[in-house]
Amino acid sequence: MKKILVILFIIPLISFAQTSTETMIKKGMDTTKYIPLGLQVGDMAPIIVGRSLNGEHINSGEILKEKNIVLIFYRGEWCPICSRYLSNLNDSLKYIVDENAEIFVVGPETFENATKTIKKTKGDFILIPDTLFQIEKDYDVMFNVTKKYQGKIKTFLRTDIAKNNNQEEATLPVPATYIIGQDGLIKWRHFNYNYSERATIKEIIDNLK
């Protein structure tokens, strides 16, 4: 009887693992290399230091003295899902800001390509081009892209991911969202390998309250 119960418990876990791996591969993640898990709720959020697209020096430690931070990762100006999401985010920016929060949008592309992102989305948020991938590494969202997916993006979106990021190797972030409280701890996160699934504005606002 115990053996049967153990088997019944293990089968769903195996099925879930297979489904998760299939999703990762389908969405372009090279599962033979490092697989990011993202920081967890309750973790101390690494300090974000960088330069925004507008040339402003950013230090999250200073901002957290007065506000919470909503940190959103995106993949690039070539990604239509990212552009739609950031456009919708921009339309609802006031509702997030009214909850005493600052929005950081972080991507791996160059300043030149990040400028295209702002133009496409008409973004009024703080966009930080993470050209050295430091923020993506600190928040454990970065992964290597499969050759097959790179080919797909070249064919359908006419973009070389590595060149778009001015890198030799194609890497992307999981388009995760973190809410960082004024105490410096991560109080909520949305982390999904399926880049079509993003944090909703309602989820962000509800978890800022």
Image (spheres, rainbow, N blue to C red):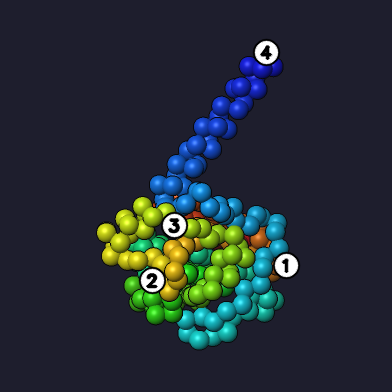
Tag 1 residue? 183
Frontmost of labels 1 and 2 is: 2
> On residue 163, which mark appears?
2
Mark sitting earlier along the chain (1/2): 2
Seen from the viewer's position, the closer of residues 188 and 117 is 117
CA–CA distance in space, label 2 to label 3 = 13 Å
Element at label 1? loop
Mark sitting earlier along the chain (4/1): 4
- Residue lying furthest bottom: 55
Mark sitting earlier along the chain (2/4): 4
CA–CA distance in space, label 4 to label 3 = 44 Å
**Quadrant in the rendering for residue 183:** bottom right
Mark sitting earlier along the chain (4/3): 4
Tag 3 residue? 145
CA–CA distance in space, label 4 to label 1 = 49 Å
Q: Amino acid at mark 3?
A: Val
x and y percent of residue 116 in the render? 36, 76
x and y percent of residue 19 in the render? 48, 38
Q: Amino acid at mark 1?
A: Asp
Q: Amino acid at mark 4?
A: Met
CA–CA distance in space, label 2 to label 4 = 57 Å
> On residue 1, which mark appears?
4
Seen from the viewer's position, the closer of residues 114 and 131 is 131
